[in-house]
Image (tube, helix red, strand yellow):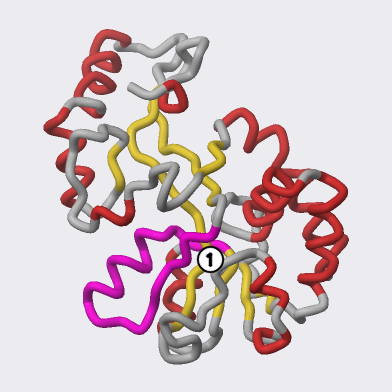
């Protein structure tokens, strides 16, 4: 298993992965016209048409702040975020994850800064006017599994974790439209599996997210509100 999927100290193991990217409504931003880079989001045509959720989770404003700072560095990243704030980004509150994708589909916004890219792919396959943008780099994190130190049935817990990372379980996750960590499990939509060519990722560990979430959220409040 790839190093980013296993904690170096053995405290957790990845089960499925999440890739967070901007999304867009394909009627309000027809394919080919959508912003493809961070700089493209500063185009005046998108002023007042960009939305973001604002709760302390990766699939929300702080996750976008994190990927900007990781990509550009602190000084340049903060300068960029101040420019983006002038685009009158719409704060949709708690509508992180699936709800903001539903708002995109309904045409309430042209662009959403931070969505689960597989949500857009699932809806697009059903005919919804929505897509995701392979903006470089993208925020990546994991759904993990751990065994509690004083678990009442530790051996049963170990067996469950073994099952969750087995080929059988990984295929079950795939069939439920999650992205398994096992690279040998083919996805229904191969474009969703990231690679360093089509989509570069920055991986954020559970510990880093917990440690930095307050900082990222405060930057969003300071710059955008």
The residue wearing badge 1 is 22
Q: Residue at x 49, y 90 (%)?
A: 28
Q: Quadrant of the N terminus?
A: top left
The percent coordinates of residue 36 (x first, y second) are 54, 69
Magenta stretch contains residue 42 = no
Residue 147 image point, x, y percent: 40, 17
Tell me if 207 is positioned left or right of 14 in this view. right
**Between 68 and 199, the one nearer to me in the picture:** 199
Instruction: Name the residue rendered at 44%, 87% in the picture.
Output: 30
Quarter assignment of residue 88: bottom right
Front in this rendered view, residue 58 or 181: 181
Q: Is residue 194 left or right of residue 37?
A: left
- What is the quadrant of residue 189 in the picture? bottom left
Disc 1 crowd rating (10 Å Cα; few below 14, some 14-19, many 20+) is many
In this picture, is 43 found above or below 60? Answer: below
**SS at mark 1?**
strand
Task: Determine whether, in the image, residue 33 is placed left or right of residue 78.
Answer: left
- The range drawn in magenta is 114-135
Magenta-span inclusion, residue 131? yes
Tell me which residue sits at (25%, 82%) in the image: 127
In the rendering, at what x and y percent does residue 148 appear?
44, 16
Q: Nearer the viewer, residue 24 or 73?
A: 73
| Quadrant, the C terminus | bottom right
């Amino acid at each position: 298993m790839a190093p980013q999927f296993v904690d170096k100290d053995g405290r957790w193991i990845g089960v499925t992965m999440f890739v967070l990217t901007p999304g867009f409504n394909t009627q309000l931003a027809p394919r080919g016209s959508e912003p493809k880079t961070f700089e493209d989001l500063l185009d005046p045509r998108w002023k007042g048409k960009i939305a973001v959720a604002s709760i302390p989770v990766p699939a929300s404003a702080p996750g976008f702040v994190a990927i900007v700072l990781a990509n550009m560095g602190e000084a340049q990243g903060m300068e960029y975020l101040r420019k983006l704030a002038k685009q009158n980004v719409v704060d949709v509150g708690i509508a992180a994850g699936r709800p903001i994708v539903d708002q995109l589909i309904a045409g309430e916004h042209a662009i959403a800064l931070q969505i689960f890219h597989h949500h857009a792919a699932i809806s697009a396959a059903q005919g919804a006017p929505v897509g995701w943008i392979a903006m470089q780099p993208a925020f990546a994190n994991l759904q993990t599994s751990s065994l509690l130190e004083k678990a009442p049935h530790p051996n049963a817990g170990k067996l469950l974790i073994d099952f969750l990372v087995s080929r059988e379980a990984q295929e079950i996750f795939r069939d439920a439209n999650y992205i398994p960590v096992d690279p040998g499990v083919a996805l229904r939509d191969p474009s969703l599996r990231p690679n360093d060519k089509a989509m570069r990722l920055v991986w954020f560990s559970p510990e880093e997210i917990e440690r930095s979430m307050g900082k990222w959220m405060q930057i969003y409040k300071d710059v955008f509100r």
